[in-house]
Amino acid sequence: MPRPARLLRTTAWSLIESAGLPIGALALAGWLWGRNAGLIAGVVIVWIIAAIRKIHTGTVPSLVVISVVVLTLQTALAVATGQVWIFLLHFPVANLALFFVFARTARGPNPIVARLASEVVALRQPTTPSPGLHRFFQDATWLWAAIFLFLAICMTALLVTQTTAMFILLATAATVLLIVAGAGASALWLRVVLRRLGLGLRFVAS
């Protein structure tokens, strides 16, 4: 892994381009021109970021791909309807979309959790491929697919049974809790797997 200062910069930029810039554009345009303009601005920004990444590096980071999927779905549902409950429907729909994104790659040669580890925290895998480590990334991808599916089910139930204010409060709390728990479990799981495989983590200059 890179040294802490570089790791912090890499992680911070990944979060800024996948979430910070789109949300900033959404907030600014929404404040100036209204909700729909804000939602469209957020989607336009994330698509521009994806296009720039594709042209400049030939690839699009997984977090940006996730933002493209989620924000495009959110905006399509919100702009196409003026109904509050349909606007809120984007929360479970977005999580369901993430479930499919993660599940689609879980059994393949390039599971999305491995890509996220490389892009977000610049984790380098051993030069000699490790089948055990690859299985971990596949299984961890299934774990995150299950987390997003569970969130989609929970949010659907909350949408049907709760008021708008309570839905937003509970949905936000559930999302934060499960994401933090999933990240912690994944990190501990990776540590156990590395020890079992006789691999270790070390910081490098670049």
Image: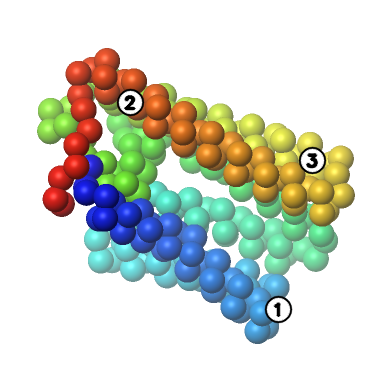
Q: What element carries label 1?
A: loop
Which residue carries the number 1 mark?
34
Q: Which of 108 and 88 is in front in this view?
A: 88
Q: Residue 158 carries which label?
A: 3
Q: Nearer the viewer, residue 202 or 86?
A: 202
Distance from the alpha carbon under mark 1 to that under mark 2: 47 Å
What residue is rendered at 70% in x and 73% in y?
35
Secondary element type, mark 2: helix
Observer-side mark, 1 or 2, equals 2
Q: Is mark 3 on a helix, strand or loop?
A: helix
Q: Distance between the residues labelled 3 and 2?
A: 35 Å
Tag 3: amino acid: Leu
Labels 1 and 2 touching (C-beta < 8 A): no
Question: Picture coordinates of residue 155 (x, y %)?
Answer: 72, 41
| Residue projecting furthest to the top | 196
The crowding category of the residue bearing disc 3, from other C-alpha atoms within 10 Å (few below 14, some 14 to 19, many at least 20), is some
Under mark 2, the amino acid is Arg
Q: What residue lies at 15% left-to-right and 45% top-to-bottom? A: 204
Instruction: Give the left or right position of residue 56, taking residue 76 as reference.
Output: left
Q: Can residue 97 be seen in this view?
A: yes
Q: Where the N terminus falls, by quadrant?
A: top left
Which residue position holds label 2? 191
* Figure check: 129 above or below 97: above
Up-down: is 80 above or below 99? below
